[in-house]
Image (cartoon, rainbow, N blue to C red):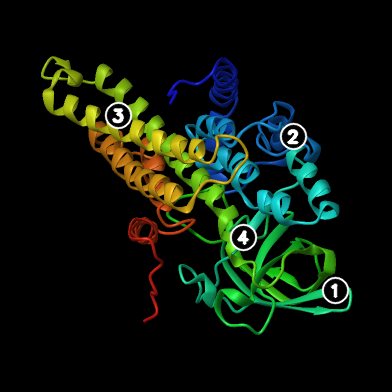
């Protein structure tokens, strides 16, 4: 087992790091201020550098690199901010991969190409007011009428809601109860009958706008069916890659917080010497470094365990990686705020923003607690019925 990146991966990491650190800090501050998504002009710049769809096949407009390569790029963007990294996250681990894996080529090819060129953003629409962790309780329905699918319902917590160009909508496509009735449909953002609630005011994730989605007799062509009823398991298998993206965003935030803490403790002086000279500070830094490194290795192991290429990682490995990374980033970002004292608590500095953003990843994409249920299920060898 090789724990070192190969020369091509190091070159990719260096390119992503240079672009992110040199080009994106001011954009990150602007998105934090306005709560607007990354503008299309910037998405095209991402695309020109090859940072969108890193792991999508070449024939679909991507670079054809591995899932691990994609997460290497994503981490460097996440070190700057969640907002500037989010388009990369969506393109390397988001719903476009569900379309690429499961959709018809006539739908998948133009959509994937548009995402890779920075011309389109596709968001996933899973949760509902009464269906979050219990996703099989969703009630949004799609019925097939001739050559069309007609959708009705309400979706919630959609990152990109109201701003994305299209939506990967989980919905009930038959009368079967539970997972057996669930599939997915692609819906363009300008379809008649599609409307949005006001932008959500969240604790963090500024620059990643979200809003409720309302579907009132929204009609799309039948070839927009991505997964028919009964395909819920396929949807969740693809979603395991998004969990790795979630964990990588956590790693990027944690790594950046650690770097900021390291710089601060060597500059800040108290009692006539840098605070790095105090053993209590040294112990905190060591613990933070262990957590960041362990989280990164769990993500990389999840991807390497799937063959390291384009295969989808397992539920057990992704749950371990996501759960650990989600808990790590909250602790490391919180420790950075504490180490920096008043400066860490001040909005002028980045530690406060990272702390707020850190909390969201253990909620998005499946809560920390549900990841622990998944881990226990893999250990015991069976799924647990949460309803009885």
Quadrant housing residue 153: bottom right
| Residue at figure coordinates x 80%, y 56% from the top left | 104
250 over 288 or under it: above or below: below
Question: Looking at the picture, how far across and down is residue 284, in whole percent?
Answer: 20, 31
Quadrant housing residue 7: top right
Residue hosting label 4:
234
The earlier-in-sequence mark between 3 and 2 is: 2
How many residues crowd around disc 2 within 10 Å: few (fewer than 14), some, or many (20 or more)? some
Helix, strand, or loop for circle 2? helix
Q: Which mark is residue 289?
A: 3
The one of 53 and 270 positioned closer to us in this rendering: 53
How many residues crowd around disc 3 within 10 Å: few (fewer than 14), some, or many (20 or more)? some
Helix, strand, or loop for circle 1? strand
The earlier-in-sequence mark between 1 and 2 is: 2
Residue that extends furthest to the front in the rendered view of this protein: 381
How many residues crowd around disc 1 within 10 Å: few (fewer than 14), some, or many (20 or more)? some
């Amino acid at each position: 087992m090789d724990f070192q990146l190969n020369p091509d991966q190091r070159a990719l990491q260096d390119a992503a790091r240079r672009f992110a650190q040199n080009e994106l800090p001011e954009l990150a501050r602007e998105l934090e201020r306005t709560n607007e998504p990354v503008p299309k002009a910037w998405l095209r710049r991402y695309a020109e550098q090859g940072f969108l769809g890193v792991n999508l096949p070449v024939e679909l407009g991507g670079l054809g690199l591995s899932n691990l390569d994609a997460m290497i790029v994503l981490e460097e963007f996440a070190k700057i901010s969640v907002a500037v990294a989010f388009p990369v996250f969506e393109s390397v681990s988001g719903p476009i991969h569900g379309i690429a894996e499961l959709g018809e080529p006539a739908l998948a090819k133009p959509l994937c190409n548009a995402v890779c060129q920075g011309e389109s953003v596709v968001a996933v629409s899973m949760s509902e007011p009464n269906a979050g962790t219990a996703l099989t309780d969703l009630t949004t329905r799609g019925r097939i009428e001739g050559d069309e699918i007609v959708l009705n319902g309400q979706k919630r917590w959609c990152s990109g809601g109201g701003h994305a160009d299209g939506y990967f909508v989980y919905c009930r496509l038959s009368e079967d109860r539970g997972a057996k009735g669930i599939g997915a449909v692609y819906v363009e953002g300008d379809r008649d009958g599609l409307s949005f609630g006001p932008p959500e005011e969240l604790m963090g994730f500024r620059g990643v706008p979200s809003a409720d989605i309302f579907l009132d007799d929204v009609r799309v062509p039948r070839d927009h069916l991505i997964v028919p009823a009964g395909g819920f398991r396929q949807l969740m298998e693809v979603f395991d890659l998004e969990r790795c993206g979630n964990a990588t965003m956590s790693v990027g935030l944690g790594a950046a917080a650690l770097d900021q803490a390291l710089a601060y403790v060597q500059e800040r002086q108290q009692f006539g010497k840098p605070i790095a000279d105090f053993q209590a500070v040294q112990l905190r830094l060591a613990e933070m470094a262990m957590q960041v490194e362990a989280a990164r290795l769990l993500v990389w192991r999840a991807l390497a365990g799937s063959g390291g290429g384009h295969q989808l990682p397992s539920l057990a490995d992704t749950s371990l990686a996501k759960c650990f990374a989600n808990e790590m980033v909250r602790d490391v970002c919180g420790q950075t705020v504490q180490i920096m004292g008043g400066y860490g608590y001040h909005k002028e500095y980045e530690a406060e923003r990272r702390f707020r953003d850190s909390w969201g990843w253990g909620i998005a994409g499946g809560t920390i607690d549900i990841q622990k249920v998944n881990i226990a299920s893999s250990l015991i060898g069976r799924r647990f019925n949460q309803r009885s």
